[in-house]
Image (cartoon, rainbow, N blue to C red):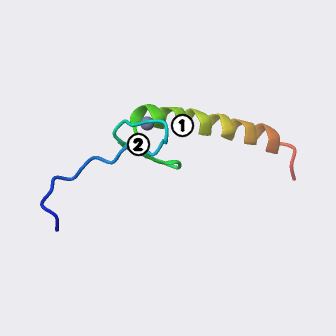
Amino acid sequence: MSSESARVSSCDTPTCSSDAETITPEGYVCESCAAKIAVEYEQARERDLEAGSGEA
Ligand SMILES: [Zn+2]
């Protein structure tokens, strides 16, 4: 085992260099990116519900 103190992982968003704090479907990201991802997933889910309502 390494005796170095564990470094906090950095956000998985390529354009972001914040410390990762939250696991999301997109990876381990910081809180602001997690919030953005959550909004995107919510929008995608709503689109799917609307688009899928006529499907058998
Ligand atoms: Zn981030």
Vertical arrangement, residue 15 with respect to residue 12, above or below = above
What residue lies at 54% left-to-right and 37% top-to-bottom?
37
Circle 2: element type: loop
In the picture, residue 21 is in which quadrant?
A: top left
Circle 1: element type: helix
| Disc nearest the viewer among 1 and 2 | 2
What residue lies at 28% left-to-right and 46% top-to-bottom?
8
What residue lies at 37% left-to-right and 36% top-to-bottom?
18
User: Which amino acid is tagged 1?
Assistant: Ala
Q: Is residue 21 left or right of residue 15?
A: left
Q: Which quarter of the figure is the N terminus placed in?
A: bottom left
Front residue of 40/6: it is 6
Mark 2 sits near ligand 1, with its Cβ under 8 Å away: yes
Q: Which mark is residue 38?
A: 1
- Where residue 44 sits in the image (x, y, percent)? 68, 39
Q: Is residue 7 left or right of residue 28?
A: left
The residue indicated by pointer 2 is: 11
Front residue of 20/40: it is 20
Front residue of 15/40: it is 15
Mark 1 sits near ligand 1, with its Cβ under 8 Å away: no
Q: Is residue 42 left or right of residue 54?
A: left
The mark tally for this picture is 2
Q: Is residue 28 left or right of residue 47?
A: left
- Of mark 1 and mark 2, the one earlier in the sequence is 2
Q: Tell which residue pokes out farthest to the left in this image.
A: 3
